[in-house]
Image: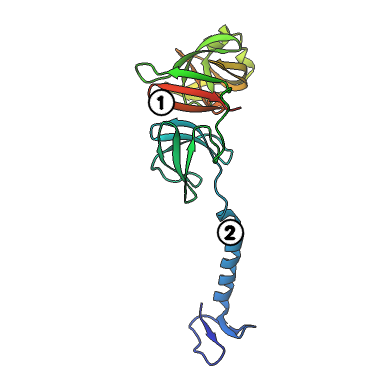
Amino acid sequence: MRIEECGKITRPFGGRVAENSYGFHVSGNAFMTALRIVAVLICLSPLAGRAADVGVIGLFPGKAVVVIDGGAPKVLTAGQKPVDGVVLISTDRESATFLVDGQKRTLKIGQHQGGSSPPSSAQSATLTADVQGHFVVDGQINGGSVRFLVDTGATTVSLSASDANRLGIDYRKGQPGLMGTANGAAVAYKVKLDAVRVGDIVVNNIDAAVLEGSQMPFALLGMSFLNRMEMKRVGQTMVLTKRF
């Protein structure tokens, strides 16, 4: 955009020049473009000043499970590209350090944007990894015993049709569909579980999937249960603490 004090000026190539009310000669097209840019910047300025709301619900070496702006839990890896304006810098046994909209912040497990940790009376369960590094734990579904494998990659709690029948779950009344497994797609039924128990933790009304024709040595303790937990791993031990 070309601006000069009122007087004789050389007409710039390509655009019409007019004198505005402030006594400046301004290219018409350039002036309108500038106004549009200013309008966009004004509209965006409140958003630019709004920092992401971050809560830490799980800690692992070099990784953190976080809730950003009240959304679904996400796993951040140290050094990866920003996720919703949040970058994980590092983790230790007690906390994670982030770059949130350009500001460095350190949050402990259970903290929510500088908030306090959950009360010590919160329901919790302590799990120990097996020789393969997997966390397997005895629990209950609707009061019946189940052997769970912790699986953060599973969207929901998942169990075999044989386990469902043993537990008295009429899964065929659920919504049928297909679910991807290590052995390919399998027929699955979406159901609601009355209660899932692990250690001292009891969670009610849990989404689950029952897989037909799949030989599962364990039920999968997926994110429909885990997203209500804070997860803290130290070495071969993982502590789950109920959030809500």
Outermost residue, top direction? 166
SS for tag 2?
helix
Q: Which mark is residue 212?
A: none
Name the amino acid, label 1. Answer: Val
- Which residue has dot 2 on it? 45
Identified at 45% across, 18% down, the residue is: 127
Which coloring applies here? rainbow
Image x and y of residue 167, in percent: 58, 9
Asked where in the image residue 242 lies, by quadrant, the reply is top right
Q: Is residue 152 above or below residue 89?
A: above
Question: What is the quadrant of the C terminus in the image?
Answer: top right
For residue 87, above or below residue 92:
below
Name the residue at 49% across, 35% down: 108
At 57% across and 41% down in the image, what residue appears?
69
The residue carrying mark 1 is: 234
Q: Quadrant of residue 41?
A: bottom right
> Are the residues flagged by discs 2 and 1 in contact, CB closer than 8 Å?
no
In depth, the one of 51 and 10 nearer the eye is 51
- Residue situated in front as seen by the camera: 104 or 149: 104
The three-letter amino acid code for the residue at tag 2 is: Ser
Label 1 secondary element:
strand
How far apart are labels 2 and 1 at the CA level? 42 Å
